[in-house]
Image (cartoon, grey):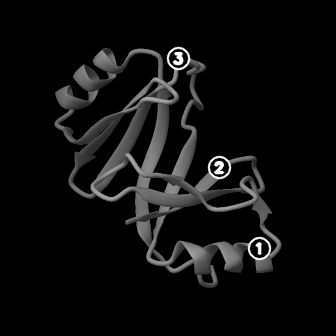
Amino acid sequence: MGNLYATGVQHIGIPTNNMNSTIEFYESLGFTIAYETVLEKESCRVCFFKLGSLCIEAYENHRAIMKPGAIDHITIDTSDVEAAFEFARGKGLKLVNTEIQSIPEFWANGIRFFMIEGPNCELIEICQIL
């Protein structure tokens, strides 16, 4: 894939309209909550569920389409988001974000990320946990 400084799949993002039922469902499958927060500005509750090496991010945005194909994005972990962004721009990939984004509320020290769009309109997030 070139060099996005990728270290693996970080998580799969799924929107939800009801976080409580989402928590109940994933816990019934054996997942545990690895991290939970609320993005105050967006009034969006976010949970990261872990089962072995699989991590699923659910976020309560009240806009989930509630039909097959509802996965919003796949996230690739990166060790250097700036270099990955320059690589993506240099390769002419379709950037969804014109600059690197950040969410300081996630995990202990925040995240920095950007999105690209694949050939099938799939969203790929390139993310560095700080």
Count residues near mark 2 (Cα–Cα under 10 Å), then give few for <14, some for 14-19, many for 20+. some
- Left or right, residue 119 beside residue 126: right
Residue visible at 31% across and 16% down?
A: 21
Q: Earlier in the sequence, mark 1 or mark 3?
A: 3
Dot label at residue 123:
2
In the rendered structure, are the residues bearing label 1 and label 2 in contact, judged by CB atoms less than 8 Å apart?
no
**Is disc 3 in contact with disc 2, using a CB cutoff of under 8 Å?**
no
For label 3, count other residues whose C-alpha is less than 10 Å away and answer few (under 14), some (14-19) or many (20+): few
Which of the two marks, 1 or 2, is nearer to us in this view? 1
Crowding near the residue tagged with mark 1, few <14, some 14–19, many ≥20 C-alpha atoms within 10 Å: some
Residue drawn at the location 22% of the way across and 47% of the way down: 51
Residue 55's spot in the image, x, y percent?
Answer: 33, 49
Quarter of the image for the C terminus: give it: bottom left
Disc 3 residue type? Answer: His
Q: Quadrant of the N terminus?
A: bottom right
Q: Nearer the viewer, residue 125 or 128?
A: 128
Q: Which mark is residue 62?
A: 3
The structure residue drawn at horizontal position 26% and vertical position 30%, both measured from the top left corner, is 26
Toward which corner of the image does residue 85 lie, by quadrant? bottom right
- Identified by mark 1, the residue type is Arg
Q: Is residue 31 above or below residue 93?
A: above
Label 1–label 3 contact, CB within 8 A? no
**Residue 101: horizontal and vertical position, in percent?**
59, 55
**Mark 2: amino acid:** Leu
**Residue shown at the point (33%, 23%) measured from the top left:** 22
To which residue does mark 1 refer?
Answer: 89
